DNA sequence: TATATTTGACCTAT
DNA sequence: ATAGGTCAAATATA
């Protein structure tokens, strides 16, 4: 077990290191030339580099025994780390896989093993905007609960297309006790709804990644502009490599574990936030080789180039917010950002539950 | 009127 | 028994 449990892990380490090198070279170019690159750009590169190294080191340290890592696929149950405090008790993941206990009622009520991944979104303070991200998915709030030990209630959201299209994707938004500016968003299940190109979104957010129209249909919708109590409706997408950085918001994403990252994270900020994200690309990136390219393009422009969709098992988290609100918000963020604002996201994958569901539509339950 | 949110009750897992 | 997650009626908003 001291060895990498799987080729997959080894590849990831190599990939991370290669990526770090690539990024370092880019940074070098930026430094040499007085290019138009801004500090943010450089900082972004720096973050990426550090992240890559940290990640690689982390993999080396843990080199956990893998489960069955098969090939390139990410091993399903690895937890890298931590469970956020706020998420406290939740994750348990293992699923026994018994599905059995289903009562007749609603399967949906059962907390079964469902793949889930968490992202932390840091929003600049004072803006009052608690995160708004538009990943192109529409969410509808269906509940809110006070969580033991947490100062703020947790909001529960489901895909708006649940009934219409049977999309079972859900997410939970929990505001951090310590940092009110941080929201932990846990996604479950991937979207199965059909995509529908929504012009409005695109227009406003050019940066927004677009999932494939064919696979999943993320469509940018917005919903409750009005209230956001503790849980903003936001969407994050772990998968796509796009990060939008639109304002000065910075998004930092990290994935905790190589295994876990389902996909990528992409955040879209309508306006123009700056995002720093890490990638979790293992999965996402279908072509690992191109990763660097993607980054390059992203880094340079901060614009996403192409994404792939998530096909990764549907783990696609989203942050969503109403655009209408975003604009203003973003603007605010920009301002503040100068100094401090940042939106950071961290992904954590949860554990376990990736088993079979991971791949796609899960069987799980349908309404 | 249609759609989204709020909120208490209900259900399940621990 | 308790905490977390979901449902669904009531309410709010466009």
Image: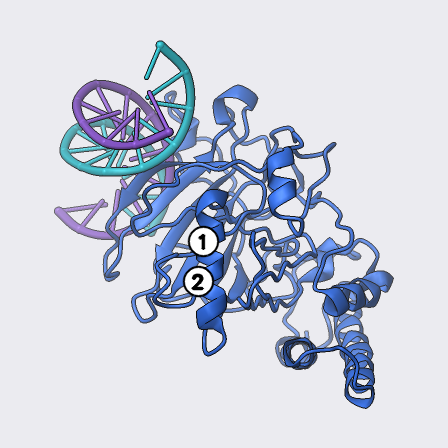
Chain colours: A blue, B cyan, C purple
In the image, A30 versus A236, the foreground residue is A30
Q: Which residue is drawn at 51% across and 25% down?
A: A366
Q: Residue at x 77, y 54 (%)?
A: A305
Q: Which residue is drawn at 56% across and 23% down?
A: A165
The x and y percentages for residue A31 are: 77, 88
Assign a secondary structure to mark 1.
Answer: helix
Per the rendering, the mark at residue A183 is: none
Whether residue A358 is visible to the viewer of this picture, yes or no, is no
Assign a secondary structure to mark 2.
Answer: helix
Q: Is residue A255 above or below residue A223?
A: below
Tell me the crowding category of disc 2: few under 14, some 14 to 19, or many 20 or more residues within 10 angstroms, Cα based.
many
Locate residue A213: give its quadrant: top right
The x and y percentages for residue A175 are: 34, 59
Q: In this view, does A188 lie above or below A279?
A: above
Per the rendering, the mark at residue A328 is: 1
The x and y percentages for residue A303 are: 71, 59
Q: Which residue is tagged 2?
A: A332
The x and y percentages for residue B8 are: 14, 33
Chain containing mark 1: A
Cβ atoms under marks 1 and 2 closer than 8 Å: yes
In the image, A31 versus A260, the foreground residue is A31
Residue A346 in the figure: left or right of residue A83:
right
In which quadrant will I find the N terminus of chain A? bottom right
């Amino acid at each position: 077990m001291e060895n990498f449990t799987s080729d997959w892990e080894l590849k990831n380490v190599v990939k991370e290191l290669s990526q770090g090198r690539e990024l370092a070279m880019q940074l070098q170019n930026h430094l040499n030339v007085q290019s138009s690159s801004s500090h943010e750009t450089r900082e972004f590169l720096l973050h990426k580099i550090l992240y890559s190294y940290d990640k690689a080191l982390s993999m080396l340290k843990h080199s956990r025994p893998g489960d069955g890592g098969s090939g390139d696929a990410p091993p399903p149950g690895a937890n890298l780390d931590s469970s956020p405090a706020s998420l406290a008790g939740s994750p348990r993941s293992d699923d026994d896989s018994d599905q059995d206990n289903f009562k007749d009622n609603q399967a949906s009520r059962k907390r079964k093993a469902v793949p889930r991944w968490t992202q932390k979104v840091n929003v600049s303070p004072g803006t009052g905007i608690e995160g708004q991200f538009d990943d192109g998915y529409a969410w509808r709030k269906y509940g809110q609960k006070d969580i033991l030990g947490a100062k703020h209630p947790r909001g529960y959201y489901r895909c708006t297309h649940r009934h219409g299209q049977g999309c079972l994707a859900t997410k939970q938004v929990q505001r951090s006790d310590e940092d009110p500016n941080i929201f932990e968003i846990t996604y479950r299940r991937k979207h199965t709804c059909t995509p529908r190109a929504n012009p409005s979104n695109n227009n406003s957010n050019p940066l927004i990644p677009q999932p494939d129209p064919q696979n999943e249909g993320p469509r940018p919708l917005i919903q409750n502009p009005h209230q956001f109590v503790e849980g903003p409706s936001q969407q994050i997408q772990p998968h796509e490599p796009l990060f939008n950085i639109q304002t000065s918001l910075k998004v930092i994403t990290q994935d905790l574990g190589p295994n876990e990252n389902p996909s990528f994270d992409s955040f879209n900020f309508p306006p123009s936030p700056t995002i720093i994200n890490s990638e979790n690309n293992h999965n996402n990136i279908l072509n690992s080789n191109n990763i660097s390219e993607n980054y390059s393009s992203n880094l340079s422009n901060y614009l996403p180039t192409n994404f792939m969709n998530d096909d990764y098992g549907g783990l696609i988290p989203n942050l969503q917010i109403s655009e209408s609100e975003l604009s203003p918000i973003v603007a605010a963020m920009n301002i503040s950002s100068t100094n401090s604002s940042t939106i950071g996201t961290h992904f954590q994958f949860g554990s376990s539950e990736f088993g079979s569901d991971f791949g796609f539509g899960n069987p799980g339950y349908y309404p």
